Amino acid sequence: MSIESNLLKKERQNVTFSVEELTNVWDGGKEDTEIRRKVVKVFGDDPVLKSPPICTMTREERYTEATRKCVYIFRNMLQKNGIYPGSKEFEHFWNAMPIEYTLLIHMGAFIPCIMSFGSEEQVAKWLPLSANLNIICTYAQTELGHGSFLRGLETEATFDRETQEFVINCPKVSSMKWWPGDMGLNANHALVMANLIVGGKKYGMHPFMVQIRDLSTHMPLPGVTVGDIGSKMGFEAIDNGFLYMKNVRIPRENLLNKNSEVKPDGTYVKKASDRLMYGSMVNLRVNLPKSQAIDVLAKACTIAIRYSAVRRQGLLNPGGAEVAVLDYTLQQHKLIPQLATVYATKFAGEGIIKKHQAFLQNMAKGNISDLAEIHALSASFKASVSEQCTEGVEVCRRACGGHGYSQASGLPHLLSKVTPTCTYEGENTVLYLQTARYLVKCAKEKAADLPESILFLVQPIQNARGNITSLDNLALYFKNRAALCVQAASKKVNQMSNKGLAMHEAWDKSSVQLVHATKAYVIQYIFDAFASFVKEVKCSKSVKEILEDLCCLYGLHYINNCSGDFLKLGILTAHHCNIAEEAEIALLEKLRPNAVGIVDAFDFTDSSMESCLGAYDGNVYERLFDMAKLSPLNKEPVHQASYKYLRPYLLEGRDILEGAKSKL
Ligand SMILES: CCCCC/C=C\C/C=C\C/C=C\C=C\C(=O)SCCNC(=O)CCNC(=O)[C@H](O)C(C)(C)COP(=O)(O)OP(=O)(O)OC[C@H]1O[C@@H](n2cnc3c(N)ncnc32)[C@H](O)[C@@H]1OP(=O)(O)O
Ligand SMILES: Cc1cc2nc3c(=O)[nH]c(=O)nc-3n(C[C@H](O)[C@H](O)[C@H](O)COP(=O)(O)OP(=O)(O)OC[C@H]3O[C@@H](n4cnc5c(N)ncnc54)[C@H](O)[C@@H]3O)c2cc1C
C-alpha cells in the first residue's frame, strides 16, 4: 500500500460518525441508497459502457463514444433493468450515467416539453417514438441573434390555409437556431419555437414539431441547413447545433396545441395562459441544478478533499514532519465551506422540486395561481446555485495546485460542465432580474395576499437574541438582510421614476441593487430551507451534529464574505462580525477530522469521477503516472512533429556539442 493510501486509511479511522448513515441522509433514506447503488452497479458492471478516459480522446471520439453508449442505455439497458421514467430507479439514473453523454436534450428537455405542450393525441403520437429513439428531437429555441429576450426571436411559422401547413422560415442569418443540444448531428426532428403568423397577424412564440432529416438516409431535408456549431469550452461530446430553415413546410397538426390551436379556417384559439409557454423552462430550472451543478460540486469536493488529505507539502511545526495540505487552516477555509454549499443547495433544491410537483398537480386541475412564485423561486435558485457551484468547483480546482490544472484530475472537466449552467436555461443576470420583478411587486402587497415563502418581506424586522451564531439567529440575519435589500432596491426604482425617468429606465438604473436584493432573497431561502431540514431530519446525534455544523458554516462563511452588507444595513455590528469570523475558523477546525468521511458519504464511484486525484484509495501519484503514459502524444517514443521540425537544429546542436567535446 502506498504512503498516500495509508494516509487516507488513517483519515477514515478518525471519522467520528457513521459514513453509511450520512449517505442514507444524503440519498433521502436507506432504501434510496440501496436503489441508487443498484442502479450505479448495473451501469458500472456493464462492459458495453467501458471506454477510454475522456482526456485521451479527440472530440470526434468523445461524441462517437457518448452516442454509442447513450443509444445502448436508452434503447436497451434501462428497459432490461426495469429503470422506467417515474420510478425511484430513474431518479437515480443521472447519478450513474457515464461521465459524458449525448441525447440529453432529447431525453431531458424535449420529452418533458412534448408532455407539457402536446395535446393528448400529440403526446400519444410523439412520446413512444421519442422514448424508443425512433425519432431524435432537440429543443430549438435560442437563435444566433437572440437567446434571453424571447420576444426578439425571429424564426417564423406562417399558416398557409390552402395547403393546411405552416411554412417555417429563418429570415436572416441571425434568426437561425443556434446552440440546441443533440441538434447538429443526432436529431431528425426539432421542437422549434417560432413566431406564429396567421393571416398576417403575429401571435408570438409557439412550439412546432419540425422534421429536419430524412428518416432513412438521415440527410437534411430540402430547405434545411443543419450542423454542429464547433468546439466549445466543454460538453465536447454533445453536438450543439445550428439550424437554418428556408420554406420548410409542416402539417397544421404539428403546432403543439395543448395551450393554443390554429383551426383549419385560420381561427386562432387560445386555451391557456401565455405564460405556460414558459413552463418547460421552469421545469428544467427546477430539476437541472442537482445533476448539473450540485453533484458536480460534490464530486469536485470529493477530489479536492481526498487529494488534500494525502498531498503533503511544507511544515506546520518547524522541524516536524511534512503535513497534509488539508491541515492548513487556509486550505480548510477554501474547501470545507464548499461541502456546506453542496448540502445547503441540495436540501433547499429538494424543497423546490416538491413545490413544483404540487404546482403541476394544481395546474392539471386548472389552478396556476402559484406560477409567479414558482417562476421567481426557480429562476433565482437556478441562478444562485449555478453561480455558487461554478465558483466552488474552481476553488476546488485551484486548491489542488498544479495537478488541478491537469485533465487527469477530472477537475477541468467538472468545471467545464458546471460553468454553462450559469448561461443555459436562462442567463443568470436575466433570471435574477425576473425574480426581482416579483419581489418588488410583492413588497407592495398586503401580507394576506402573499405566499408564506415571501411573507418576511412585509413583516417588521425582528431582533436576534442569544447566541449570535445559532441557526435561528443566522436565519434571521438573512431574512432581515433580504427584506432590507428589497426595500432599498424598490426605493431606488421609485426615486428614479419620481425623477422623471420612464419605468424601464428607472429599472435599468436600479438593476445593480435589484440583482443584489434577489441574491439576498435566494440565499435566505436556501439557508432557511437547509436549517429547517437539519432541525427536522431523523438521524443519530453524531450525524446531526455534522449537518448542524455544515449549516452553521454555510451561514457564517457567507456572512463573513459580505460582512460589509450586514454592517451597512445595521444587522450586525463590528463586534458581531469578529465573533462570526472566529466562529467560522473554529468550525473549520472541528469539521477537519471528518472531512474525508463527509465526502466519502457522497458515495461516488471512482469511474463516475475519472480522477487520478480523487480515487477512493488515494493512490494519486501512480495514477497520474499511468494516465500520462496513456497520452496519445506518448504513443511513439519519438513524435513525428518534434522529429520533423526540430531535427535540423538538434543536429546542429549535436555537432556543436560533439565539436566541443573533441576540443576538450
Ligand atoms: C431531470 C432533468 C435534468 C436533466 C438535465 C437536462 C438538461 C440540462 C443539461 C444541459 C443543458 C441543456 C439545455 C439547455 C437548454 C436551453 O438553454 S433552452 C433555452 C432557455 N432559454 C431561456 O431560458 C431564455 C431566458 N429568457 C426568458 O425566460 C424570457 O425571455 C424572459 C422571461 C427573461 C423575458 O421574456 P419577455 O417576453 O420579455 O417576458 P416579460 O419579461 O415581459 O415577462 C412576461 C411575464 O411572464 C412572466 N414569466 C416570464 N418567464 C416565466 C416563466 N418561465 N414562468 C412563468 N412566468 C414567466 C414574467 O414574470 C412576466 O410576468 P409579469 O408581467 O411581471 O406578471
Ligand atoms: C452549453 C449550452 C447548451 C445550450 N443548449 C440549448 C438548447 O438545448 N436549446 C436552446 O434553445 N438553447 C440552448 N442554449 C442557449 C442558451 O439558452 C442561451 O445561450 C442563454 O439563454 C443566454 O442567451 P444569450 O446567449 O442570448 O445571452 P445574452 O442574452 O446575449 O447575454 C449576453 C450578456 O447580456 C446580458 N443581458 C442580456 N439581457 C439583459 C438584460 N435584460 N438586462 C441586463 N443584462 C442583460 C447577460 O447578462 C449577459 O451578460 C445553450 C447554451 C449553452 C452554453
Image (tube, rainbow, N blue to C red):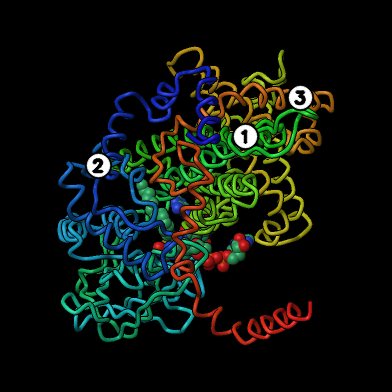
Q: Is residue 651 left or right of residue 631?
A: right
| Residue type indicated by callout 1 | Pro
Q: Which residue is mark 1?
A: 337
- Residue 23 visible in the snapshot: yes
Q: Which residue is mark 2?
A: 42
**SS label for mark 3:** helix
Looking at the image, which residue is at 47% across and 59% down? Answer: 629
Mark 2, Cα crowd under 10 Å, few <14 / some 14-19 / many 20+, is: some
Question: x%, y% of residue 154?
Answer: 44, 76
Looking at the image, which residue is at 68% across and 86% down? Answer: 652
Mark 2 or mark 3: name the one nearer the start of the chain: 2
**Residue 643 position by quadrant:** bottom right
Q: Nearer the viewer, residue 37 or 110?
A: 37
- Residue 440 visible in the snapshot: no
Instruction: Work out which residue is located at the far right of the displayed protein and give it.
Output: 574
Q: Quadrant of the C terminus?
A: bottom right
Q: Exactly how many numbered labels are in the figure?
A: 3
Question: x%, y% of residue 293?
Answer: 49, 47
